[in-house]
Image (cartoon, rainbow, N blue to C red):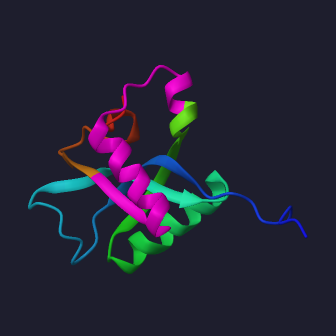
Amino acid sequence: MSNTGKRQQQVYTLVVEIGRKAGDGLPKGATGAALMVFASGVDEAEAVRETVAILKQADTAPLDVTGYGTYEERLAEGHEISADERALMQRALDENAVIVAQMTPFFGEEGGVGNGPLQ
């Protein structure tokens, strides 16, 4: 029998903008943050759903998610991917996990997803 019904897990790079919430762990004075996340899923929609659910459990307030695709899609777009990023992507795949690779806090009125770590 074949497993044609089961789709392969992949790792997606996401940037999640979070707002302020009591107990969120963001620095004092920050208005929010952008999180660069590596999340596994059978498709990007599943990776986004899992990421948002986990971030809510961690007492953060996800506001917006921007997907940058899989490792292969990012390479095709010309993104430079460091060995550290590749290792975190592999870990997310191996552990079927959501991994926050980078957090960039926003201060003042500047900020937003457009100023996130991949821009």
Estimate the x, y position of residue 71 in percent, counting from the top left: 51, 38
* Quadrant including the C terminus: top left
Estimate the x, y position of residue 54 in percent, counting from the top left: 43, 73
Locate residue 25: give its quadrant: bottom left
Question: For the image shown, how many numbered marks are present on the structure?
Answer: 0
Q: Is residue 11 magenta-colored? A: no
Q: Nearer the viewer, residue 3 or 17?
A: 3
Q: Nearer the viewer, residue 115 or 98?
A: 98
Residue placed at 42% from the left, 53% from the top?
90
* Quadrant including the N terminus: bottom right
Residue at the top extreme of this rendering: 78
Residue at the front extreme of this rendering: 1
Could one spot residue 36 in this view of the protein? no
What span is colored magenta in the figure?
Answer: 74-101
In the displayed structure, does residue 36 sit left or right of residue 27?
right
Relative vertical location of residue 70 with respect to residue 11 in this rendering, above or below: above
Residue at the right extreme of this rendering: 1
Residue placed at 52% from the left, 48% from the top?
12
Q: Is residue 97 magenta-colored? A: yes
Estimate the x, y position of residue 32 in percent, counting from the top left: 26, 55
